[in-house]
Image: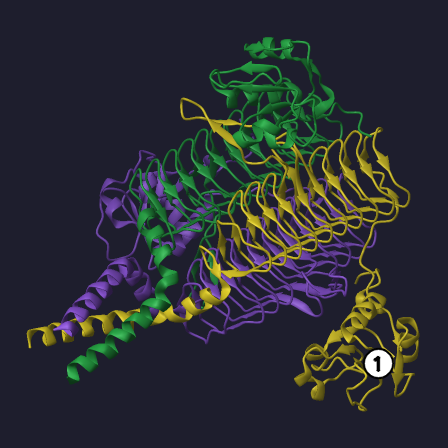
Chain colours: A green, B yellow, C purple
Amino acid sequence: MSTRPKARAVSLTVRELAERLGLSFEGDGAVVVSGVAGLDRAGRGDRSFLAHPRFRPHLEKTGASALILAPGVAWDRTPVLRAENPHPAFVRATELFFKPFRPDPGIHPTALVSASAKIGRDASIGALCWIGDGAEIGAGSILHPLVAVYPGVRIGRNAVIHSQVTIREDVSIGDNVILHAGVVIGSDGFGYIKGPDGRHIKIPQIGSVRIEDDVEIGANSTVDRAALGETVIGKGSKIDNLVMIAHNVEIGTNTILIAQTGIAGSTKVGNNVITGGQAGLADHVTVGDNVFIAAQAGVAKDIPAGSMVGGSPHLDIKDWLKLSALLPQLPELVKDLKRLKTKLEELDKK
Amino acid sequence: MSTRPKARAVSLTVRELAERLGLSFEGDGAVVVSGVAGLDRAGRGDRSFLAHPRFRPHLEKTGASALILAPGVAWDRTPVLRAENPHPAFVRATELFFKPFRPDPGIHPTALVSASAKIGRDASIGALCWIGDGAEIGAGSILHPLVAVYPGVRIGRNAVIHSQVTIREDVSIGDNVILHAGVVIGSDGFGYIKGPDGRHIKIPQIGSVRIEDDVEIGANSTVDRAALGETVIGKGSKIDNLVMIAHNVEIGTNTILIAQTGIAGSTKVGNNVITGGQAGLADHVTVGDNVFIAAQAGVAKDIPAGSMVGGSPHLDIKDWLKLSALLPQLPELVKDLKRLKTKLEELDKK
Amino acid sequence: MSTRPKARAVSLTVRELAERLGLSFEGDGAVVVSGVAGLDRAGRGDRSFLAHPRFRPHLEKTGASALILAPGVAWDRTPVLRAENPHPAFVRATELFFKPFRPDPGIHPTALVSASAKIGRDASIGALCWIGDGAEIGAGSILHPLVAVYPGVRIGRNAVIHSQVTIREDVSIGDNVILHAGVVIGSDGFGYIKGPDGRHIKIPQIGSVRIEDDVEIGANSTVDRAALGETVIGKGSKIDNLVMIAHNVEIGTNTILIAQTGIAGSTKVGNNVITGGQAGLADHVTVGDNVFIAAQAGVAKDIPAGSMVGGSPHLDIKDWLKLSALLPQLPELVKDLKRLKTKLEELDKK
């Protein structure tokens, strides 16, 4: 059994919880809550959980010992914490019950840190990490075990870098950035020129990557360094697992790229964009702000700000939904056409 | 040259082979066999191989020194081992000639194992592995070098974990599980709520992952931990390379997910399902048992048990095949339609 | 700040640069150049860069201190180096200004190298690498930190293997091969036979992988070992990030596979083939030489040499482009068809 505090090891009364979250409560303040769960889960018998009523139908059958509800919702079967916005309140409650693992502050004795690297105050450098010459790790940042940091990398404050991550030379990473396990930042862009003999001659990829503050990048995603200049992931953007960002791509702020999205070289994606899973963007495309790109879409042309698109090659999403609904009728349409043809020929003979 | 026994270093006579496999044989029992090969390969001149006649056309031109054949198949050019089911017999023969590498049992002196971790009997913990507090590794399990096991992880018996794998905190992994190199289990699910200022606020992903017995997961695939509760990969399911399993997904037993499949959050996939390569399943979808989903399909709606589907958005596979066959005729259909229109107008004038 | 020489730390005069590149120059040979940039970048004020006029419109507004231009192009605003082929000259210039990081030659004291492994002259084995029994690393090759090399692996001369790479047992890798971070070579192929009880019985994957000379493989891509025989990546082929190569695939020479391409088992791809991003090739398909496969295409049938294809399932690219252009008109066509029907019925009544 683990000796580490687990998610459910913390217990608080409803009164304590209300105080810590700055919320009012109704009902018995002495009821003990020892974790959090979605209503559907808590409904399955785990009676000591604080539940978040995301799915209203589950409300009646919940087994939770307490709920977080908006002011208007009537409820007296358990104690209730009242929050104008139950979802963010639930998120904050979650944090009270769950302390994610972090290595102790300081440099683990088995980590290899270059004498010319600078490690900020209270940073944690996990076991068996390697940090190259001149790298800088900001205050409070965490490197989990087995991370590779090439020379000249700069990482800001309070970043979290999980195991098996590689950060190549001279990459710049902002504050509060989270890189999940297996992420690769700064690998060479994919660029060649064709020699006279058909061989591909590698174009040195001498640019870098800049990951701005508050970015999160999912497991095993890759961000290539620029051929020249920088590949940029803008502040607050969130990237899911197994996403590919090619060289010289520029992603704006607060943009979301769902899993297995691929973005080819030099493409520019605006702010607050969302791409669905497995979407693909060709090279040298410009996507405006607030664009939504549906899952599996294929984008080879510029998309103006505010558009919603789907399909491959992409269409306006309304046209694509209409087309998708019509396509299964194509066999029937073909029959219709043949019938018409026959009829017309008959008519013509008359 | 390697000092390790290679695949072809073992030699057995046909007689020895028959004994070990519990099969009868015909022909010269003294013929030496020193490896296994498909008939097509063995046909290319490597005469000392035991061949599996998967492809009948190759039978005549095989260069193999012996064959495994079903009872009815006539053959006298080489010795023959007779098996009711040649394929499983061939698989067992393969195992006689090939001992995959495993580190010696015990904990390598360079591995970092927490004092509170428990390592089962005859387990092998490879060089430069890191195992966190309270983790448990079952008897006979193998961790190849450079594996990261976060605190609170439980791994069953006889599991094989390859290099560069990361297993995040509190993940549970069953017996006989194989995780190939670069796999990430238990990375944070991709969940945010939008703040009033447009920023994405991370929802703590405090659930876990349960990988049941006999599961195999391919290189660089990722399985995210649940937001709340568990992401589950059911007993005996097999997952190929570069597959993405999002938070709170539940996969049944004996299901097969081919390479680069992506399954979004909270989707439930039944037992004995097969997804083709690059298939994508949207979030909150339910896929019944025994469903077949073709390569590159896009699934955004529930699929009842026993269905076969293809296309994006998905259709019944018969409809999709019909549609795929018709689509290339669309330009011709458009011309037909125009001709009809003209003809009708002419007729109308008359 | 980094103590390592950065890209821009080298400065050369135009005269020195011309000498080293074997080019003539016009203008002031004393002008100092301290880096390279594309014209668009250099145009943003970084005045000390040598620019490559890839994008002619940028020529007028460049801020570069010197240019590489073909003989015919008139220019007197800055010194000019003249090259018959400016692009390759630019590539060679790039190499003068950028020395990528490499660990010092020799075996880092924290690397674990088997006593039976052979390390070539001037090879660099980085910190915390693990190299198994009987492995061979050729002269001048570089293993960056945290690489796992299983027993029996052979790596040629002047290869570069980045951090977090795993090379499984008995894999063979040629000269000048580059494997980017997180690559997995030689993971088990995905092969099972179905047992009578519905369980999937693993077919031992006892073949290997052969990566020929001059191959480059992008971050987090995976190449599975053959069930029997070899998976082959031919000389000079270049593979982008997150690409999946299944067991027994054979790729020819100088072929290019763009990011997230997936190639299923036993498929054969010729020489000088290009696949676009997220293309998928089914198993047991043969693709001839000089084939172009568009992004997101789905290939389930053989493709003859010299073809260009797109779509899923794939069509000749001209047919696919025609179809893609027509599809959005389908709703209008359906309306047309209905109008015709009505008109014909009216006519029929008359």
**Label 1 belongs to which residue?**
B82
Who's the residue at 41% across and 42% down the image?
Answer: A249
User: At which x and y percent is residue A165?
Assistant: 62, 38
Residue B294 visible in the shown view: no
Vertical side of B40 occupied by C67: above or below: above
Element type at mark 1: strand
Looking at this rendering, what residue extends furthest in the left direction? B350
User: At which x and y percent is residue B148?
Assistant: 72, 38
Could you classify mark 1 by the number of other residues whose Cα lies within 10 Å: few (under 14), some (14-19), or many (20 or more)? many
User: At which x and y percent is residue A228?
Assistant: 42, 43
Q: Quadrant of the C terminus of chain B?
A: bottom left
Residue A220 visible in the shown view: yes
Q: Nearer the viewer, residue C201 or B7?
A: C201
Total count of labels: 1
Q: Nearer the viewer, residue B186 or B102?
A: B186
Q: Nearer the viewer, residue B97 or B152?
A: B152
User: At which x and y percent is residue C73?
Assistant: 24, 54
The kind of residue on which mark 1 rests is Arg
- Left or right, C253 with reference to C345: right
- Left or right, A251 with reference to C28: right
- Which image quarter: residue A142? top right
